[in-house]
Amino acid sequence: MQDETAEVAVLGGGVGGLTVAHELSERGLSVTVFEAADRLGGKAKSHTYKPTPDVALPAEHGFRYVPGFYRQLRDTLARIPREDGTTVADHLIGTEETLVASVTDSESLKRTQTPTSVDEWMAAIRPSVGDDQLNLREINYFQRRLLTFLTSGRLRRRDEFDQVTLWKFLDADNQSQAYRTYLAEVTQALVAMDPRRASARSICRIHVQLVLDQVHPDRSTESILDGPTSDVWIDPWVRHLRSQGVQFRTGTSVIAIETDGERITGVATGQSGEPVTADYYVAAVPAEVMTKLVSPELIRAAPTLEGVASLETAWMNGLQFYLTEDVPLSYGHQAYVDAPWGLTSISQSQFWTEGPFEFDDCCDAVEGVLSVNVADWETPGIVYGKPANACTPEEIKTEVWAQMAEHLNGEEERLTEDLIYDWALDPALTYDPDERQLTNRAPLLINTVGSFRHRPSADTDAPNLFLAADYVRTETDLATMESANEAGRRAARAILEDVGANHLPRVWDLSEPRVFEPIKRFDDTAFRLGLPHPGELEREVRGGLLPRANSLCGRLFR
């Protein structure tokens, strides 16, 4: 019989923590969420920028988008009712195209919808830019590298490809500059991952999913919300959770997790260390916060938490340009392939016209919002010759605008300074003028080589401590809303199993074409025998890394 008297303390009110609260409260458990910030939603929440006391404009940590393979998050969005009778999922709008802009090549529009003709299929599989600089051999080789990953087994991915950078896996050093620029380095803007440091396992898994999104007839490639994230999603979610009995204590930070060496005995919160006790505890804080909470005593109770300190973070923050005229650019995202700061953007207003958000209620002078993500904070820019993390906020604004204008103002001048009504930098970034130092309170987890072994699972060895954050081992395996949502579901499942519940939250695995399953099973056998994948033989022989090919392995996969 289910124990419905269990009390659960959720430490953190981001996507992971709210997911746990959703799944547990839906099944009758008592949940209290403790959040250090004044508003819920973590890195997904919107912010308010006030250029004047009478004007309040929406701003984001970075724009949000929901790829087609996000099954966990889409399911949750469909179960969040809004006051108008719709669900949050009803407010997802599918994009149609991505504008790929280049300084050295002509720009192109790539469809983000499933191809319906031969020409569209050919356009979908070609590189976005650089067609005249990439040769067919390099394009074919890149595709064979992805096929090598797609046909590799679970063991090889975990124990071999997680130990290899994407750069090395793609053999980028032995290819042309065009190959490196247009094929190997595209992950920088996509997920803030430096291909020279990121794990081939992590990035290839997601790259494969994004490719499958476009060719799968039953799922959209990508969708975005029809309004600011908090207006459309987070605030309705919190209202729904309150209606289910969830209690929220905002402005309450966690300063210590206390243990008797086996179980969690309580949590110290706030500046005074106010004690909080519950039957179960869910740590739903980001990795950089959890690192500070992991004490030697906590590691003795939950040894897998020791690896959290080895996880690394990087910066991926955004800024908004509020424009006096709307500049749509494309009905989807924009990627700036030659931008040293790894820029991507989206023109928001065109997607908000049919949604519940009204710009007229904010400011009559604003007609458009260009939301921009900066993925590379360590490469010098084109205006000041400094990396973004060494710039003042004003310099960041000027540099980002200049890099976008360099890409977009070719045949026509689409971005001019007189369009800017105002701009807002992610409030997680703060600048100390005396120290001339920019700091980031909300960095992003990155999957570096070998980091998978450091990531704990949602259920720990401490019987009443669970984890719900994007550093937890999940199928998605990246710092994303989907990964946080999946971790929250896994934590909720473990608690519900412990209290004897029968109806558990569903967790979906990433899907790949079934046609490759027999080859993957063969590859697991080959890996146990110490044999390389045939695709790796091709790369290693080309790079002079192996003296000879293993003919037995070749016959296995021929």
Image (cartoon, rainbow, N blue to C red):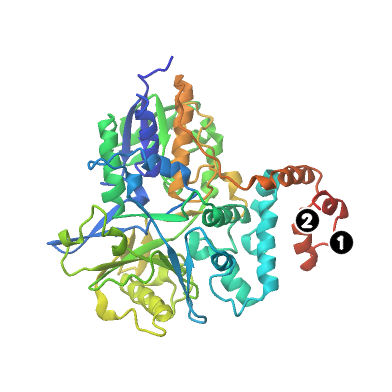
Element type where label 1 sits in the image: loop
416 horizontally vs 485: left or right: left
135 horizontally vs 209: left or right: right
Whichever of callouts 1 and 2 sits on the residue coming sooner in the sequence is 2
150 horizontally vs 437: left or right: right
Please say if the residues under marks 1 and 2 sit with CB atoms less than 8 Å apart: no
Separation of marks 1 and 2 at Cα, in angstroms? 12 Å
Residue at which label 1 appears: 548
Element type where label 2 sits in the image: helix
Instruction: Please state which of residues 418 and 517 is positioned toward the viewer in this rendering.
Output: 517
Q: Estimate the x, y position of residue 512 in percent, counting from the top left.
A: 61, 47
**Residue at the farthest left position:** 54
- Taking the spot 40% from the left edge, 54% from the top edge, the residue there is 223
Whether residue 291 is visible, yes or no, is: no
- Taking the spot 46% from the left edge, 33% from the top edge, the residue there is 491
Whether residue 85 is visible, yes or no, is: yes
**Residue at the farthest top position:** 1
Q: Quadrant of residue 281?
A: top left
- Taking the spot 26% from the left edge, 45% from the top edge, the residue there is 235
Instruction: Please state which of residues 308 and 256 is positioned toward the viewer in this rendering.
Output: 308
Q: Is residue 194 above or below residue 515?
A: below
- Amino acid at the residue labelled 1: Arg
Q: Estimate the x, y position of residue 488 in percent, counting from the top left.
A: 44, 38
Q: Which mark is residue 249?
A: none
Q: Quadrant of residue 270?
A: top left
Q: Is residue 470 above or below residue 303?
A: below
Residue at which label 2 appears: 534
Q: Estimate the x, y position of residue 212 in percent, counting from the top left.
A: 56, 54
